[in-house]
Image (tube, rainbow, N blue to C red):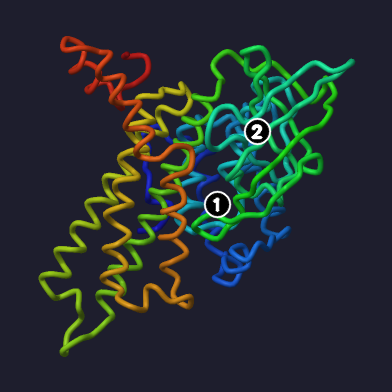
Amino acid sequence: MPAEEVMRLPYRSETAALLSESATRLFGAVNDGELRKAELGGWSETSWREVAEAGFPLAFVSEAGGGFGVAPAEAIELVRIAGYHAAPVPLAEAMLANRLLTEAGFAPVDRPATIAPVTGCTAFSLQREGAGWRIRGRAVGVPWARHAGTIVALADHDGSPFVVALNRTIAELEQRASLAGVPSDALTIDALLSNDDVRPAPTRWNCETLRAAGAALRVAEMAGALERVLELTVTYANERVQFGKPIGKQQAVQQSLAVLAGQVAACGGAAAIAGAAFDGLDIPSIAAAKARAGEAVSVAAPIAHQVHGAIGFTEEHRLHFFTRRLWAWRDEFGSERHWSAILGGQALAAGAEGLWPFVTAFGAPQEAR
């Protein structure tokens, strides 16, 4: 299925449609060599420049702030298209970083940007020192940190969250990689900051809502990547001939493909829920979407590799670019276990009378809640 057909929103604006077409052309031009380069720690300044010139990092920013003024649920489609093509740039991270920056009163940035922390809630603390601030802490698994010009972090000061715009050069960086092989670095910071680098976080932003926002974007990426996995697997099953006929004609393989397609559809539905919940930072809906997307990946990726057989595990085949990203995204910004525990706690808190309304509220328009 073409990436531009992955999500069809009834309220999709003309601007959003143009952005999606532009993203499909841009990311569709990415070749396997560029993907391998990223997995070896490389960086394509040309690729990022094209993304920045298209304005994609500002997709969540209001028109007055320099963005396009499209609805967040529409802007998230860019992330889904990037996932479909395994785009080797931190688009989701930069979009979220700019959303947090602008809501806190900073100017947006067009250089590569990322978010910290991705895991945990107590990575950084702030203390007043002289006329400025001292920030201390350590965060692991920060996506693309070594290539980011700006790291946007939430830091705690006297129990309140603050948004901090960090220059990467102030951090001691330990280069690491995610399961996908892309940069996922550890940062240790003990540095002085000016007042211009620190802002109180808007009331709706805290560690929990930041993780939920990141999770919603990961669900969109997972939905796009799973669409591509299904496409690759069906194509291979129809091309691979065994005992005189394509393996896709075998009933057992057809059953596996049907299960795979079902999981892809479920993840697509989860992405739609997460996208609708992003702007309101609706944690229960995002939690359900991330947990369901993680389950879909756990079922679908093994099926894809089983159908491909040994070739699917080779470096030369493209399948691994998508399945390894899926396995990495499944755990980033909260795993299935993390979000399932949150949902379970909220379901228990709702009690017997409130359980059914709690369940049926998922995916409902915010104004209807």
Residue at figure coordinates x 56%, y 43% from the top left: 92
Q: Would you name the residue on which mark 2 appears?
A: 98
Residue at figure coordinates x 28%, y 13% from the top left: 349
Identify the element where label 1 is drawn. Answer: helix
Q: Would you name the residue on which mark 1 appears?
A: 23
Above or below for 39 versus 76 = below
* The C terminus, quarter of image: top left
* x and y percentages locating residue 107 in the rendered image: 75, 28
Residue in the foreground of this view, choosing between 331 and 317: 331
In the rendered structure, the answer to whether residue 148 lies left or right of residue 209 reads right
Above or below for 216 versus 353 = below
What amino acid is at disc 2? Asn
In the rendered structure, the answer to whether residue 91 lies left or right of residue 258 reads right
Q: Which mark is residue 366?
A: none
In the rendered structure, the answer to whether residue 119 lies left or right of residue 98 reads left
In the rendered structure, the answer to whether residue 162 lies left or right of residue 265 reads right
* x and y percentages locating residue 268 in the rendered image: 33, 44
Q: Nearer the viewer, mark 1 or mark 2?
A: 2
Q: CA distance from mark 1 to mark 2?
A: 18 Å
What amino acid is at disc 1? Ala
Q: Residue furthest top?
A: 353
Crowding at dot 1, Cα within 10 Å, few <14 / some 14-19 / many 20+, comes out as: many
Residue at figure coordinates x 54%, y 25% from the top left: 207
Q: Residue furthest left?
A: 251
* x and y percentages locating residue 211 in the rendered image: 50, 31
Residue in the foreground of this view, choosing between 76 and 325: 325
